[in-house]
Amino acid sequence: MAFIEFKNVRIAGISTGVPKHIEYTKDNPNISSEYDAVDFIKSTGVESRRIDDRFTTSDLCCAAAERLIEDLNWNKSEIEVLIFVTQGPDYICPATACIIQDRLGLSKECYAAELPLGCSGWVYGLSYAASLLSTGNVRKALLMAGDSKFIMPIPDQLSSHAGTVTALEYEEGNDGFKFHFGTDGSGWDAIYIPDGGARNGVTPKSFELEEINGKQMCRLQSRMNGMDVFAFAISTAPKSIKKTLEHYGVTMEDIDYCILHQANLQIDEIIRGKLKLPPEKVPYSLHVFGNTSSATIPITINTQLKGKIENKPTRFICCGFGIGLSWGTVLFNTDNIVLSNLVELD
Amino acid sequence: MREKIIKILTELRPEFDFTQEGVNFIEEGMLDSFDMVNLVSELDSTYGISIDGVDILPENFATVDAIVALLVKNGAK
């Protein structure tokens, strides 16, 4: 059982960077040959997305980081940990985290590392940062999480671009974070990009189109076995949340908000139903930001709870689940959290 | 129960005839994973049940009889 707890660390603030360009689902004539925009929105919940291939995830995260550092009145020289969670690094190598350290002007005495996870990535990244901070040897960390453009565009109408920054700091006596993690690598090919890695490099064949689930795609584009992912999501996420609550002796009544990875509205609603949670405890951001991979949990807290929780002790349970197959659930409290205004890049 | 299931399926994909006997809805491409998400959501709310993720298998949605069996297994009356 992968239950892990780190004390003496808190979230100081969250910020989000997105492209300014908004793509409205209702204006897209090519949703699917079988569904119109109304049906698509009803099922997925995605009314609009932020898409702009001029920006990489690191561009979005760096812009969000500058805003958050200013809002927190942090000195950049104090930031000793940088964790970057993305599946879309700037280059195959080196790690984009190293580039970001220099770009943001952080101290060279900085632990910078990268985590190539998707939907579960923010929860895993949080555990990396929290484990380091809980020692007290380092005091301030930035966790960046998000995805934007990949080597080739993802041919779906759910994915959206965002880069989030979660600022964490050491705080003696803070209850910290209580995690539950899980992995089922037997489902590695439920969502994957076949070519472009060391297993199958890029060859002329990588660009040839083939029909996958009724769509013309090449081998550098992400493909998904929807049925497998759906079954995984609605069985694993509720179980992980229930296990976490039970293990740490917390009840759902103690929780103010349950933030789910913004996979798809119907999937999340099925999960909410299994947990018997009222709608007001499960906010959504996917109607305006789509599925932003590892950014969905922080973007939901940042944009949907801004103005509601900053100065009020608030207890969260958050669950990320998806590609890998990988999942993680975390329990934590916030108080005096800074939620920055949305940063839009144009 | 059969009539209600056929009504739900027809509302999801009105272009197909779900009353045909001996047709596999999955193999014939009448339902895809997108439909499956909507179908499970609709069945959950209609019958006040919570279909288990381990039951999300193509064969459990292949025919009306299979869907009836799935619902009964998950507590639908």
Image (cartoon, grey):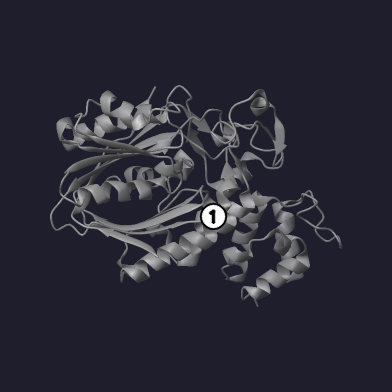
Horizontal side of residue B4 vs A109, given as left or right: right
Quadrant (top left, top right, bottom left, bottom right) of the N terminus of chain A: bottom left
Horizontal side of residue A220 vs A277, given as left or right: right
Q: Is residue B72 above or below residue A343?
A: below
Percent from the top left, x then y, of residue A283? 40, 52
Q: Is residue A32 above or below residue A280?
A: above
Q: Quadrant of residue B67?
A: bottom right
Percent from the top left, x then y, of residue A278? 42, 63
As drawn, the residue found furthest toward the bottom would be B77
As drawn, the residue found furthest toward the front would be A199
The count of marks equals: 1
Q: Is residue A216 above or below residue B62?
A: above
Quadrant (top left, top right, bottom left, bottom right) of the C terminus of chain A: top left
* Residue A106 appears in the rendering: yes
Q: Quadrant of residue A212?
A: top right
Check the residue under mark 1 and report the chain it is in. Answer: A
> In this orientation, which residue lies closer to the viewer: A185 or A10?
A185
Residue that carries the numbered disc 1 in the rendered image: A267
Percent from the top left, x then y, of residue A24? 53, 33
Disc 1 residue type?
Ile
Q: Residues within 10 Å of mark 1 (few under 14, many from 20)?
A: many
